[in-house]
Amino acid sequence: MRKGPEESATRFSLGIKKKGNDGNIWSIVKNKNGVKRWKKTQKKRKKKNKTRKIFKSKLKNVGHEKKITVKILKSFKKKYGVTTTGNKKEMAEGLWTVHGGSMSDDDLQKIIPLLSKRDIKEAEKLFKLLLRIDIFLMNFR
């Protein structure tokens, strides 16, 4: 299926505009040989937010990205039984995917700076939940 309108451009006069199969607006123009054709005139755009959101992590010890080494990540892989390879970021993503919820707080805080923004948000939710449980248990005793 073509992107432009289904109808032939030769059926209409110059300057006619129609919506194409791709959702964009197409108009009829003549090429150098005088043959009418469809030409895209307007791209389909999505509205962008003018304000830029800056992600700020509320976790402590966020500056571990440079401190954590491949050797440390390999020890985490062995500790949690994860078989993943690649650079530091890929290894951290693999650890989070397989054992994110069951990792110790210290280990998780070390790999957080290497995770994607979506995974960082999930880790923050996990920490908040664990913090609430700890506070509940302390008050319960």
Image (tube, rainbow, N blue to C red):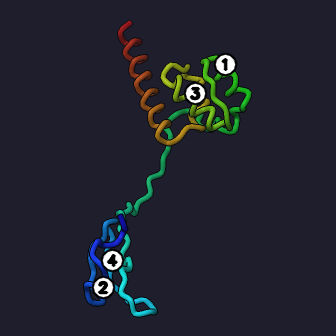
Residue corresponding to mark 2: 10
Q: Earlier in the sequence, mark 2 or mark 3?
A: 2
Q: Residues within 10 Å of mark 1 (few under 14, many from 20)?
A: few
15 versus 40 height, above or below:
below
Q: Earlier in the sequence, mark 2 or mark 1?
A: 2
Check if mark 4's residue and mark 3's residue have beta carbons within 8 Å. Answer: no
Cα distance in 3D space between marks 1 and 3: 10 Å
Residue corresponding to mark 3: 95
Q: Amino acid at mark 3?
A: Leu
Check if mark 1's residue and mark 3's residue have beta carbons within 8 Å. Answer: no
Residue corresponding to mark 1: 78
Q: Quadrant of residue 136?
A: top left
Q: Amino acid at mark 4?
A: Trp
Check if mark 1's residue and mark 4's residue have beta carbons within 8 Å. Answer: no
Front of the two marks 2 and 3: 2
**Residue at (30%, 78%) from the top-left corner?**
8
Circle 1 — which element? helix
Camera-side residue of 9 and 86? 9
Cα distance in 3D space between marks 1 and 4: 58 Å
Circle 2 — which element? helix
Q: Amino acid at mark 2?
A: Thr
Q: Residues within 10 Å of mark 2 (few under 14, many from 20)?
A: few
* Image location of residue 14, percent across then percent down: 30, 90
Q: Look at the image and tell me in which quarter the C terminus lies.
A: top left
Q: Amino acid at mark 1?
A: Lys
Residue corresponding to mark 4: 26
Pick out the residue farthest to the right: 71
Circle 3 — which element? helix
**Residue at (72%, 31%) from the top-left corner?**
70
Q: Earlier in the sequence, mark 4 or mark 3?
A: 4
Cα distance in 3D space between marks 2 and 4: 14 Å
